Amino acid sequence: MSDPRLTPFSGRIAHHSLQGQIAAQGFTAGTTARLAAPLADLLRQPDGPRDRQLLLGARVTVIDRQGSMAFVQAEADGYCGWLDDTTLGPDHAVSHRVSAPATHLYPAPDLKRPAHARLSLNALCEITDAQDQFLRTAHGLWLPEQHLAPLSHPATDPVSVAESLLGTPYLWGGNSRDGVDCSGLVQLALHACNRPCPGDSDLQERDLGLPLPPGTPPQRGDLMFWRGHVAWVSAPDRILHANAHSMSVAFEPLALAIARIAADSPVTAHKRL
């Protein structure tokens, strides 16, 4: 059976790529859109739980609509789900990403003005002008230039990106500085480096890196997997992970984490990117 997280089928309407593979009331090529809100929950059903989140500028294909909700597939990782239709706007060019853990949108190039909204690492925007160390977005709002990077200049070390989110509160399905889970931390870091990454830890274990034999000494940048959990190796004896034990993004000695988590799961994979 196809993984519903990655299958563009709302239960009623399916993407036309699935014709001949699935029984649906209708098929569509869909329409492209971008997230126009700072952050939006991607839900399993229109009134269901959050599975993941999308950030400002994320491109999606809209497959179906039901009331105030839209069923979409995210371009970045193929994840499917429902979100509030009012958070979507037309597709448009983007030129920069937020490179700081978080930043603020201002109504003018003046840091003393009340902020319009807060944006997370990896939010995307189109920059049209510059003034006084601020960059103007196509929507007429301003961001500190220190917090942005052109898309042509990705980060180079995903672990350093993940470390910049130290202390971020744990949030199941979270993908932002406001709250993140274990797989969200891995995805945020890799996407900042312009590297592909699935949304959930089981998909990451399947798709990322090369498996290493048991007993291989860990090194910075490796990923350690447990059932339902993933962590960055930040040093040979230490991991960095978003975890429900501390309810935050935190460092933890590797041996201590292995012993603590063993009650629920042994290490299922040690992989090198």
Image (cartoon, helix red, strand yellow):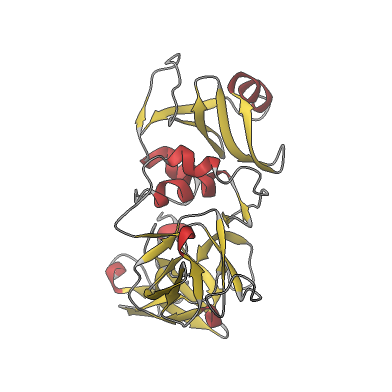
**Residue 89 vs residue 5, the one in the foreground:** 89
Image location (x, y in percent) of residue 190: 41, 46
**Residue 1 vs residue 38, the one in the foreground:** 38
Determine the residue located farthest toward the top in the rendered image: 215
Left or right of residue 83: residue 24 = left
Q: Name the quadrant of the N terminus.
A: bottom left
**Residue 158 vs residue 202, the one in the foreground:** 158
Image location (x, y in percent) of residue 219: 44, 23
Residue at horizontal 56 percent and vertical 62 percent from the top: 103
Image vertical order of residue 21 relative to residue 63, above or below: above
Residue at horizontal 63 percent and vertical 28 percent from the top: 252
Does any portion of residue 16 appear in the rendered image? yes
Does any portion of residue 9 appear in the rendered image? no
Image vertical order of residue 152 relative to residue 204, above or below: below
Image location (x, y in percent) of residue 155: 38, 47
Residue at horizontal 44 percent and vertical 79 percent from the top: 64
Residue at horizontal 40 percent and vertical 39 percent from the top: 157
